[in-house]
Image (cartoon, rainbow, N blue to C red):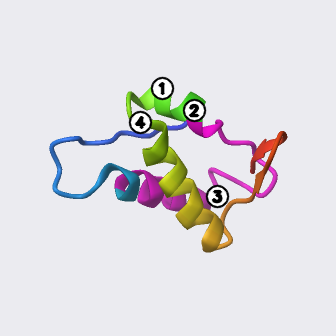
Amino acid sequence: MLPLHLQPQSHVPLYIQLRDQLRALVHAGDLRPGDRIPASRELATMLGVHRTTVANAYAELESEGLIQGHVGRGTF
């Protein structure tokens, strides 16, 4: 499981917190190319947030070229 800790009371939106933590894992080498990350629905359930929160974070990371989503195969 990924070491992710969101702070709902923070003034920083949850999707930004998630994006930043996932980005840090990529830059630290904890997430490498080809590593599969949880589907947005699965991660949302694990974190207790709405799926849109995770989808927004994933979309930003994908636009930065840090992850790639493949319909039916997952996000890497």
Give the residue displayed 22% in from the left and 41% down from the top: 8
Foreground pick, 8 / 29: 8
Residue at 42 percent of width and 31 percent of height: 47
Q: Which label belongs to residue 27? A: none
Tag 2 near tag 1, CB within 8 Å: no
Which marked residue is nearer to the observer: mark 3 or mark 2?
2
Q: Residues within 10 Å of mark 3 (few under 14, many from 20)?
A: few
Label 4: element kind: loop
Compute the Cα span from label 1 to label 3.
22 Å
Q: Which mark is residue 50?
A: 4
Residue type at the position of mark 1: Met
In the rendered image of this protein, does residue 44 appear above or below residue 34? above
Mark 3–mark 4 Cα distance, whole angstroms, equals 27 Å
Instruction: Look at discs 1 and 3 and give the one toward the viewer.
Output: 1
**Marks 1 and 3, the one that precedes in the sequence:** 3
Residue 29, disc: 3
| Cβ atoms at labels 1 and 4 below 8 Å apart | no
Tags 3 and 4 touching, CB below 8 Å:
no
Residue 29, horizontal then vertical, whole percent: 64, 58
Q: Nearer the viewer, residue 74 or 21?
A: 74
Q: Which residue is mark 2?
A: 41
- Amino acid marked by disc 2: Arg
Q: How many badges with numbers are in the image?
A: 4
Q: Position of residue 62 (x, y in %)?
A: 64, 65
Circle nearer the N terminus (3, 4): 3
Q: Nearer the viewer, residue 53 or 47?
A: 53
Labels 2 and 4: the sequence-earlier one: 2
Mark 1 burial class by Cα count in 10 Å: few <14, some 14-19, many 20+: few
